[in-house]
Amino acid sequence: MSFNKGYEFKRFEKQWEQEKIWMRTEGMRDGDIKKMYEYDRIYFNSRRRYEEHRVGEIQSDHLGVEEDFEQNLEFMDLIRDEKLFRAISQLKTNELELLKLFAIHDMRVTEIAHLKGKSKSNISEKLTRIIEKVKKNYNNPNKN
């Protein structure tokens, strides 16, 4: 199972909202609370990068078709806009995977290129084409 940045970030924010309330009731100043939040956010991003790197190594070694399919289903479950869902569902599996790494896992093009063993320009061009394809499918849902 990969690190789901969107889900984990929502959990992080929800937990932090509760902690902010507690800190304020204990008399902490807003400036100190903000500093603690920024520190925890840096830690969250560090953990995210570690998990993506670790998962990336595991996936490149032995990711099975079933696991890939399940992850794509989880990704598609995050989409609430019906037109966007239809547009993205028309992507090929490899296109969906690149989009997921870029948009959901918040990976940079250089990170994806390193993970996939491709050049940065190759990944950038593919992502541009994928995004254009999604836009086209979104704006013209009846045309393939």
Image: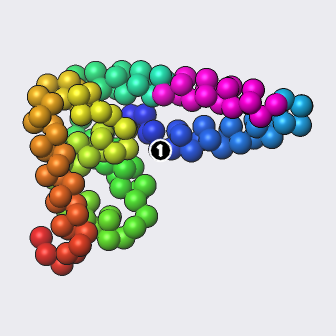
Which corner quadrant of the image does residue 2 belong to?
top left
Foreground residue among 70 and 22: 22
Q: Residue furthest bottom?
A: 142
Disc tally is: 1
Residue at horizontal 40%, vertical 67%? Answer: 81
* Res. 52 in view: yes
From this view, report whether residue 141 is shown above or below residue 92: below
Give x and y (percent) for residue 119.
Answer: 11, 28
* Element at label 1: helix
From this view, report whether residue 63 is shown above or below residue 11: above
Question: Any magenta on residue 50?
Answer: no
The kind of residue tagged 1 is: Gly
From this view, report whether residue 2 is shown above or below residue 130: above
Give the prevailing secondary structure in the magenta stretch: helix
Region of the chain picked out in magenta, as a range: 29-45
Q: Residue furthest right?
A: 26
Which residue lies under the disc numbered 1?
Answer: 6
State the quadrant of the C terminus. Answer: bottom left
Give x and y (percent) for residue 134.
Answer: 22, 60
Would residue 66 be found to the left or right of residue 76 on screen?
left
Would residue 64 be found to the left or right of residue 104 on screen?
left
Would residue 65 be found to the left or right of residue 100 on screen?
left
Q: Residues within 10 Å of mark 1 (few under 14, many from 20)?
A: some
Give x and y (percent) for residue 43.
Answer: 55, 23
Question: Any magenta on residue 34?
Answer: yes
